[in-house]
């Protein structure tokens, strides 16, 4: 009889399931209670979520998803159990390579933009799992260091969706083996839930006679130990009024906390020297960040790994990184990144993360000079180079068609405009370059002035051109063309080369050289170029718009031998055509 009922439910849902819009709903609010039992690797959850219909049509069926290692136990609306069918759903958005999906039939249709509250319950285990990486050929050793999420008796650390769906999500399937499928699904999900409110109380029981583990969630969140007979109840509050780019993450271990406001270091026994390296690097990093972005004030946490080979991970002002090594440069850079987040909150990913990565490069410049900074910045170039080449190729193809308006084609670019992207390679890596170029164009003093005037809570920040106007006012310069190419649109990358060089001498014997630079790409930039001559070199800057050329004249104390355009400060699609050798007369 029970089997017959299940079959009836599946048949009743079949027509709707075929047309199921898995991304129709956004979970706009989470209010969860999470119980962790490390000895059993177990997690149990109950609480409430709010669903908002972001589709254009009324919806009565919703697909709620959690990790495939967890199981749905109950779903209720207005205190009454609702009908749902649980099924496996293949997706690499979770480390197991699959989700446990509940297809829920709601009591009434939810109109577009309307919401519904659900009471939910689920439980299961979260062991270390490398399934999704192993099936695309990642060696087991590397996979374990990358996919380190787990609940265990000795060390617990679990990242959120994109790694482990320990809280409900609503997404289409994502596949690591299909190009950018995984990243596109994650980006869409992040974009939809950027404004969502998230609150979770995570707790575990512990025997009083043993050293209590330290639980970490959102930096600065309350950590409470309550005595109950022989047991202790350890809990931590995770709370964000707006998720933004944050991935809710929690960790538990026998940490040794070292508070040094606004930073708290959570190190493990045996890693004291690495922790001391971070502690010693704090004051110089604080001084640097304060000079650029204002005094950091929001709590920052850096948490250690039991496995020193685990890949670092950052979410908001929480950084998980091994303290087994004593690398003072890396410690300083990591601290600068997190302290920038502490000093300058922003709901704009390209501002929040882009400035933090830009600050890392500027800190390297302070330590080792401009070339050290550009080498460091160059590590970001590969992250978005291929994507931008595809954008440029698509634009060239469309523009090459007859009777096609170039401006219209460019405005419909299929790229990732920084102003709206939730793609990490763009709002981290490309944005770092954009801020560096803005610094070169506006000057450090002007950019510092603009940054210090930036207020995320300012109503003006809702205006698309708020950041542009701050920098233009401070620099007293029109930068609308640059923001249009690099921030509001994604026009690919520039491609500079030296079109022509004309050395000449005045009647008084003064050496001059006229240089014409051409930009073959679809994005303009102000680019440096260096003229080498016997006994020295001279570097100048020139603005070269997309698909255009620019000419300038430079006085030299000697005969020029070659011209090199771009020192690496402007990301280009092609760096092989940047040297022009001047033939001897």
Image: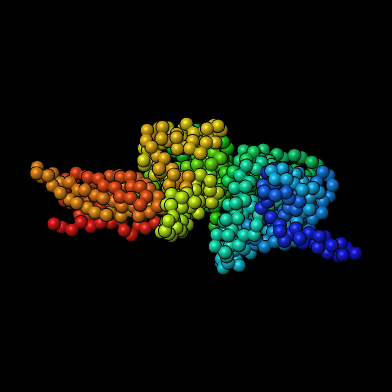
Quadrant showing the C terminus: bottom left
Q: In the image, what residue occupies the spot 73% across and 49% down?
A: 58
512 relative position to 367: left or right: left
- Chosen colour scheme: rainbow
Q: In the image, is 312 to the left or to the right of 32? A: left
- Residue 457, how many percent across, how many down? 56, 33
Residue 578 x, y percent position in the rendering: 31, 56
For residue 13, what is the image quadrant? bottom right
Measured as percent of width and height from the top left, residue 340 is found at 50, 39
| Residue at 21% from the left image edge and 44% from the top image edge | 554
Name the residue nearer the viewer: 86 or 506: 506
Q: Position of residue 376 (x, y in %)?
A: 41, 51
Q: Nearer the viewer, residue 451 or 498?
A: 498
Answer yes or no: is residue 380 visible: no
Q: Residue at x 46, y 52 (%)?
A: 409
Image quarter (top left, top right, bottom left or bottom right) of the N terminus:
bottom right
Q: Is residue 393 left or right of residue 461?
A: left
Please identify the residue farthest to the front as the structure is shown. 403
Q: Residue at x 37, y 58 (%)?
A: 574
Q: Is residue 4 visible?
A: yes
Direction left: furthest residue: 507
Number of on-image labels: 0
Relative to 459, residue 245 above or below: below
């Amino acid at each position: 009889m029970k089997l017959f009922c299940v079959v009836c439910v599946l048949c009743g849902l079949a027509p709707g399931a075929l047309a199921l819009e898995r991304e129709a709903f956004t979970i706009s609010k989470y209010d969860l209670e999470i119980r962790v039992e490390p000895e059993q690797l177990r997690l149990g959850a109950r609480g409430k979520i709010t669903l908002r219909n972001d589709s254009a049509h009324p919806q009565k069926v919703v697909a709620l998803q959690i990790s495939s290692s967890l199981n749905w136990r109950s779903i209720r609306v207005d205190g009454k159990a609702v009908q749902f069918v649980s099924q496996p759903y293949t997706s690499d958005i979770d480390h197991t390579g699959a989700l446990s999906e509940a297809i829920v039939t709601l009591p009434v249709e939810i109109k577009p933009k309307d919401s519904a509250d659900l009471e939910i319950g689920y439980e299961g285990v979260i062991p270390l799992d490398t399934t999704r990486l192993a099936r695309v050929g990642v060696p087991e050793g590397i996979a374990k260091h990358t996919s380190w999420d787990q609940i265990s008796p000795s060390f617990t650390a679990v990242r959120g969706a994109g790694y482990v769906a320990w809280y409900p999500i609503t997404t289409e399937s994502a596949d690591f083996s299909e190009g950018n499928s995984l990243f596109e699904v994650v980006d869409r999900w992040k974009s939809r839930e950027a404004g969502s409110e998230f609150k979770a109380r995570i707790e575990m029981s512990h025997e009083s006679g043993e050293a209590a583990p330290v639980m970490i969630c959102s930096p600065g969140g309350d950590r409470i130990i309550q005595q109950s007979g022989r047991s202790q109840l350890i809990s931590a509050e995770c709370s964000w009024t707006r998720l933004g780019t944050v991935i809710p993450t929690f960790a538990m271990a026998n940490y040794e906390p070292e508070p040094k406001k606004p930073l708290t270091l959570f190190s493990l026994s045996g890693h004291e020297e690495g922790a001391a390296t971070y502690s010693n690097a704090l004051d110089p990093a604080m001084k640097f960040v304060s000079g650029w972005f204002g005094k950091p004030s929001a709590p920052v946490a850096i948490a250690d790994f039991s496995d020193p080979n685990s890949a670092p991970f950052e979410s908001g002002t929480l950084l998980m990184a091994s303290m087994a090594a004593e690398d003072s440069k890396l410690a300083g850079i990591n601290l600068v990144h997190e302290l920038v987040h502490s000093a300058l909150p922003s709901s704009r990913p390209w501002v929040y993360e882009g400035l933090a990565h830009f600050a890392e490069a500027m800190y390297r410049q302070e330590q080792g000079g401009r070339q050290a900074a550009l080498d460091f910045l160059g590590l970001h170039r590969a992250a978005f180079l291929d994507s931008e080449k595809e954008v440029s190729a698509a634009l060239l193809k469309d523009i090459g068609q007859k009777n096609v308006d170039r401006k219209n084609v460019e405005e419909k670019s299929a790229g990732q405009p920084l102003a709206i992207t939730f793609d990490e390679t763009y709002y981290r890596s490309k944005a770092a370059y954009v801020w560096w170029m803005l610094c070169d164009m506006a000057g450090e003093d002007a950019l510092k002035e603009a940054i210090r005037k930036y207020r995320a809570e300012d109503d003006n920040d809702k205006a698309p051109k708020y950041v542009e106007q701050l920098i233009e006012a401070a620099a007293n310069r029109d930068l609308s063309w640059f923001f249009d190419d690099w921030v509001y649109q994604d026009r690919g990358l520039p491609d500079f080369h030296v079109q022509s060089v004309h050395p000449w001498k005045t009647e008084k014997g003064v050496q001059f050289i006229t240089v014409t630079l051409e930009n073959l790409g679809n994005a303009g930039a102000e680019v440096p170029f260096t003229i080498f001559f016997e006994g020295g070199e001279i570097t100048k800057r020139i603005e070269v718009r997309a698909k255009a050329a620019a000419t300038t004249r430079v006085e030299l104390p000697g005969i020029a031998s070659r011209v090199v355009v771009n020192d690496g400060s402007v990301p280009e699609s092609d760096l092989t055509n940047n040297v022009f050798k001047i033939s001897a007369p």
